[in-house]
Amino acid sequence: MELPRFARNDTSFCRCEADEVSRSNLQRDSSLTLGTISFDNARWPILQLAQRVVMLTAYIEAAMRKAKYEILSDDNTFYGYIPGFDGVYANAEDLETCRSELKEVLEEWIMLGISHHLPLPVVDGFKLVVEEAV
C-alpha cells in the first residue's frame, strides 16, 4: 500500500509543534488512542501520518474555538470569522451552517498556506511548521 503523497519522505510536509500544556491536554482529551507513540518521533510512516492528523485536527479545533460570530443587521444572516486568520470568514442563513462553512474555509486556508510554505498563526500553543523532508 502506498502512502499519500504528503506522508512520504520525498516531499514537504507539515509538522505541528505543541507546547507542553497543549501536548498533555491533547494526549488526555484525544479520542484516538495512540498507545506508546511518541508525539516527538514515531518510527513508522503510517504512525507519523496518524500523529500529523491528530495534531492538525487539534490545531483546527483550537482555531475554531477562537471563532467570533455576529448577526448582520441588513439581512439577519450569520457572519463568522477567526481573529488572526486573515481572509477566513463565512456567511450563512443559520449559525450551524456558518460554523460548518467557516471550518471548511479554515481547512482550505491552512492547506493553501502549507502548499505555499506560508507561516501560520500559533493557536493555543499549537504551531504548524512546513518543512522539506530529507
Image (cartoon, grey):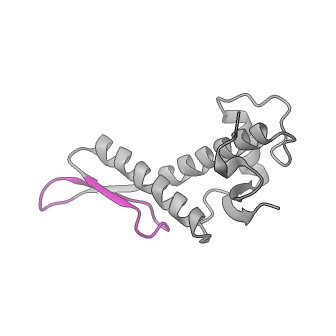
> Is residue 108 shown above or below 4?
below
Q: Is 82 within the magenta? A: yes
Foreground: 75 or 42?
A: 42
> Is residue 3 shown above or below 59?
above
Q: Is residue 99 left or right of residue 93?
A: right
> Is residue 61 shown above or below 12?
above
- Snapshot quadrant of residue 51: top right
- Snapshot quadrant of residue 87: bottom left
Q: Which residues are magenta?
A: 72-91
Return the x and y of residue 32 as percentages of the image width and height.
67, 30
Q: Is residue 87 left or right of residue 50?
A: left
Please tell me whether the stretch drawn in magenta is mainly helix, strand or loop.
loop
Residue name at image x 76 percent, y 31 percent = 34
- Snapshot quadrant of residue 116: bottom right
Return the x and y of residue 30 as percentages of the image width and height.
67, 34
Return the x and y of residue 72 as percentages of the image width and height.
20, 59
Count how many numbered circles sit on residues in the image: 0
Residue name at image x 44 percent, y 70 percent = 86
Residue name at image x 59 percent, y 63 percent = 114
